[in-house]
Image (cartoon, grey):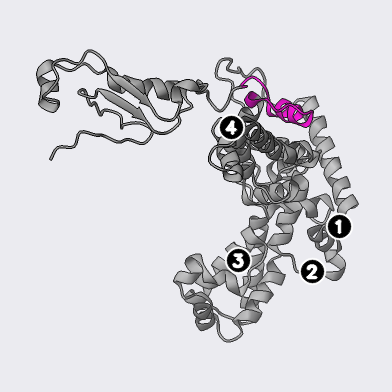
Amino acid sequence: YHPRIAVTVDMIATGTDVKPLEILLFMRPVKSRTLFEQMLGRGTRVVSATELRNVTPDTTVKDHFVIVDAVGVTEQELFDPQPLERKRGQPLKKLLESVALGVDDPDTLSSLAARFSRLDKRLNDADRAQIRTLSGGLDLRDLARRLVDAVDPDKPQEVAAQKHGPQPTPEQIAQARAELVEAAVKPLASRPDLRIFLLDAQRRSEVVIDDLNPDRVLEAGFDPQATERARATVESFRRFIEEHKDEITALQILYNQPQIGGALRYEQIRELAAALRQPPHSWTTEALWRAYAQLERDRVRGVNARRVLTDLVSLVRHALQMEDELVPFPERVQARYAEWLAAQEAAGREFTPEQRWWLDRIAAHIGVNVDIRPEDLESGEFLQKGGPLGAKRALGADWLQLLEELNRALV
């Protein structure tokens, strides 16, 4: 038996050509004009009389094809497909301001959806968490999805059908469209803090590169304006520490450490970094380090080194004049580790090569993460060496006390 009916959902795959096709039966709505015309094109294929009779013996020649429209495709408005980004010339700030002022046309909403989709790929976990907090539980993908639904010509009918049955009225469809638009724009229009954060996140994640107008170096060195900007940044950073020393946990510990000491944690450094990134300052560790390097070239080390989050500890200590030199935190930890080893040797304490393996890597971990805890040994190269049990076997029964000793001595 050779079937005479071919069924396809949306479109037949590219490269498939059914030349003897004589009847097209539409059984599902099609909104796209281009898609509809491509479907019609399946019936326009030319076939020889011999090949046609091999499929349909009682015919002679294919000189027409028949359209059976069972769902009213030919009676409804068709849309030309458009790219999601429709306002390339408008910056994100302008699009967000338009939404805040009540603009909800499809081009604006669609362009915002495209910008959000691109921006989401460049965000870190802290940024995503902040967006969920400011938006009331929605992440950037949720916001983009709502915007896409608001401009999708098929979505209102689908929503109306779920509420009112398979044949909603035009009024019900219009009401569903209005609800979709309101759900898409309300989180943006009613939350100025969210709009500000999105703009700040975009500024931090985008770098504009001009390929058409290459620069030519006229003079190398720090110009007076850049020096003044660096000085303003350093002074603002010091004021920030003074103003927030009682609010941010990391600053509380670092500010009072000479008097009372304190156990600094990586989570607290991350909290400080998030506060520094907030407008109007939008500071990063790299920007602050460059500012100090421009003003104090002889007292700043590791200018070209890759910055880590714990370098904020060195920046705060230097700003508070606790340390004369601005040294990358991992480098400072390694110097203190060398002093600690020398003190242990002077006290007659010796370590085996296996113990040194653990101690060296614990010191390196503290340099990047500001502290080490027993659970940190349950991953990475620590785990390959046996994790906490391996540390206990190598360092002895008092290995937990040794971890705390290193936390205090190196930080």
Which of discs 2 and 4 lies nearer the camera? The answer is 4
Inter-mark Cα distance, 2 to 4: 46 Å
Kindly state the secondary structure of the residue where label 3 is placed.
helix
Q: Residue at x 60, y 30 (%)?
A: 151
**Local crowd size for mark 4, using a 10 Å CA cut-off: few (<14), some (14–19), many (≥20):** some
Q: Which residue is mark 1?
A: 247
Which dot, 3 or 2, sits closer to the camera? 2
Residue at 62% over, 22% down: 87
Badge 3 vs badge 2, beta-carbon distance below 8 Å: no
Of circles 1 and 2, which is in front?
A: 1
The residue to which callout 2 is attached is 262
Q: Is residue 153 left or right of residue 312?
A: left
Q: 10 Å neighbourhood of mark 1: few (<14), some, or many (≥20)?
A: few
State which quadrant residue 117 falls in: top right
Q: For the magenta stretch, what is the residue range? A: 87-107
Foreground tag (1 vs 3): 1
Q: CA distance from mark 1 to mark 3?
A: 30 Å
Mark 2 or mark 4, earlier in chain: 4
Is tag 3's residue or tag 2's residue first in the polypeptide sequence? 2
The residue under label 3 is which amino acid type? Ala
Question: At x 88% / y 46%, what residue is drawn?
Answer: 239
Q: Which residue is mark 3?
A: 363
Front one among 14 and 233: 14
**Within 10 Å of the Cα at label 3, are there few (<14), some (14-19), or many (20+) other Cα atoms?**
many
Residue 19 seen anywhere in this rendered image of the structure: yes
Residue 93's x, y, as percent?
A: 73, 29
| 394 displayed left or right of 205 | left
Residue 101 included in the magenta stretch of the image: yes
Q: Which residue is mark 4?
A: 114
Across and down, in percent, residue 236 comes to 85, 41
Instruction: Please state which amino acid type lies under the numbered disc 2.
Output: Gly
